[in-house]
Amino acid sequence: MTDTSTRPLRLGTRRSKLAMAQSGQVAETVRQLTGRPVELVEITTYGDVSRESLAQIGGTGVFVSALRDALLAGEIDLAVHSLKDLPTAQPDDLVLAAIPVREDPRDVLIARDGLTFERLPKGARIGTGSPRRTAQLNAWARSLGLDIETVPIRGNIDTRVGFVTDGELDAVVLAAAGLARIGRTEDITEFLDPDAVLPAPGQGALAVECAATNAQLVARLAELDDPYTRVAVTAERSLLAALEAGCSAPVGALADLLVDGQVVTEMRLRGVVGSTDGKTLVQLSTTGPVPSSSEEAVALGRELAAAMLDKGAAGLMGERAL
């Protein structure tokens, strides 16, 4: 009989360079924490093989379901996800055992000739596969009197950056965290201010998930959890859930921890929903005490979502979660 205390832990991950890099980082931390070897198990998800846009295939869960199926089948012991890809409804038989310290949640611009957004030429073509980014980029351009064209793209980081270096596009917008995790921050020409472009709920954070029945592993992985990151992303995802929006809906959210000196004093939650042409945005925020529990973080997200719905947010979302 296998000695489960010494056998390698099987960590499920998508096959992309980014997924392998971030899963490798988590694997090393788990090795140090448990004293057990950790092997990466590469799993192909539907989102990896489909060439359709996320809006067409229904972005909710397309990068996650195969990993969760492997967990439930006992083929892997834990899985690492980009938190922004997770559906907001958590299955009863799986546990988000850890949400480690978050990377930079911002979006970034990678543009030809080192240009910033405001210096892009007339008619500049900007690539993004995200309705959320499309809505906010178009709104930002309208506010500045810029003439841009947003172009739908898919592909990994190398592919997307290649659209710029090959001259097909003037710029692309990506997540800062992904570039940092694969060591390509030198490609960034501008970090986009969240006042102009709010990131996706949970962007920059990772989720470490395992079966609820594996109580011993759940308890060990909990040591990787960062409480501030957890309440921040819980508030953001609660807003998304209360809006009944899926991962590919044009919704942005960011919970900031406000610091006075060395002391965290408050949390500010910002949310945005917009039409993809940028003509209409509903953008609101709320500030209050830092939630001391997931329940308080959920309540904060629901409160802001209700205010956004009162302002007409429902009519701006192309995808509603099922």
Image: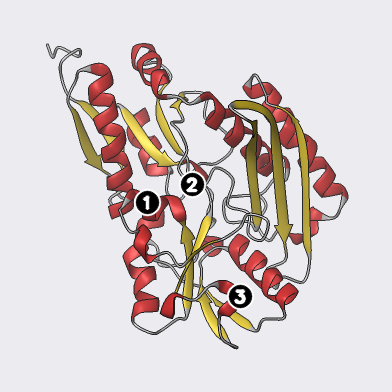
Foreground residue, 252 or 48?
Answer: 252
N-terminal of the pair, mark 1 or mark 3, is 3
Asked whether the residues under the numbered discs 2 and 1 touch, taking CB atoms below 8 Å apart as contact, a structural biologist would say yes
Could you tell me which residue is drawn at 58 percent across and 52 percent down?
Answer: 199
- Residue, disc 3: 118
Residue with the mark numbered 2: 104
**Side (left or right) of 151 relative to 147:** left
Q: CA distance from mark 2 to mark 1?
A: 9 Å
The three-letter amino acid code for the residue at tag 2 is Asp
Figure quadrant of residue 162? bottom left
> Along the polypeptide, which appears first: circle 3 or circle 2?
2
Instruction: State whether residue 188 is above or below residue 170.
Output: above
Q: Position of residue 149 (x, y in %)?
A: 59, 81
As measured in the structure, the alpha-carbon distance from the residue carrying label 3 to the one carrying label 2 is 22 Å
Q: Is residue 312 above or below residue 134?
A: above
In this image, 314 relative to 261: left or right?
right
SS of the residue under disc 1: helix
Q: Is residue 120 left or right of residue 153?
A: right
Nearest to the eye among marks 1 and 3: give it: 3
Q: Position of residue 214 (x, y in %)?
A: 36, 16
Q: Answer yes or no: is residue 260 visible.
A: yes
Residue for badge 1: 180
Q: Residues within 10 Å of mark 2 (few under 14, many from 20)?
A: some
Residue 164: percent from the left, percent from the top? 40, 77
Q: How many marks?
A: 3
